[in-house]
Amino acid sequence: MFKHLIGKQSAKVKNSVERGAVKKFAESIGDLHPIYLDEETGRNSRYKGNIAPPTFPRVFDYGTIEDLNLPNKGLIHGEQTFHYERPLLVGEDIYCYSEVKNYFEKKGTMGEMGFLVLESFGEDTSGQIVFSSKSTVIISEAVRKVLVP
């Protein structure tokens, strides 16, 4: 169903690690560590500023992969991992994009399921990778039936 998209990627999209967004995110996940929120703690840290929580890139815009048309509901978030070269610094701009890494199908008790593997990246303004993430989207039999013409 999506095998033809393997290797396709989105264009880079500029995202800002904005202080207010970091605060809201930290509050929403219940992690109010001072390294995320308190400016003095940030200044006195080895990073010389505040950083974002490790899962913060979940809120970034990664652009659109042409011809990857998934529904807005009915998908299952299967798995997600993050790898960092360094923390995200509050106030910096990050350029994000995603790539289709794999697609495969498996039969299960609920019918045939599709597994779409996406890898996403965030680069700083000099083009250095700051983080990458890998996620698996599970497409149920019911959703697959809607997607197949």
Image: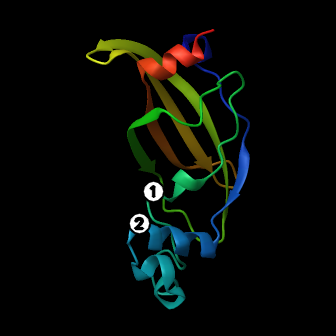
Residue 88 circle label: none
CB within 8 Å, label 2 to label 1: yes
- For the N terminus, the image quarter is top right
Name which of mark 2 and mark 1 comes first in the sequence. 2
Against 115, residue 30 (above or below) is below
Q: Residue at x 47, y 42 (%)?
A: 133
Residue 29 numbered tag = 2
Numbered disc 2: secondary structure: helix
Q: Quadrant of the C terminus?
A: top right
- The residue identified by callout 1 is 55
On the image, the x and y values in percent for residue 144 come to: 50, 17
- Amino acid beneath label 2: Ile
Mark 1: few/some/many CA within 10 Å (<14, 14-19, 20+)? some
- In the depicted structure, whether residue 34 falls above or below residue 97: below
Q: Residue at x 51, y 24 (%)?
A: 101
In percent of width and height, residue 43 lies at: 52, 85
**Disc 2: CA contacts within 10 A as few (<14), some (14-19) or many (>=20):** few
Residue 11 sits above or below residue 21 on the image: above
Count of numbered circles in the view: 2
Instruction: Give the residue type that dot 1 points to.
Output: Thr
Q: Dot 1 lies on which element?
A: loop
Q: From the viewer's side, name the closer residue of 124 and 36.
A: 36
Could you tell me which residue is drawn at 51 percent across and 31 percent down?
A: 118
Q: Nearer the viewer, residue 15 or 142?
A: 142
Where residue 145 appears, x then y in whole percent? 51, 14
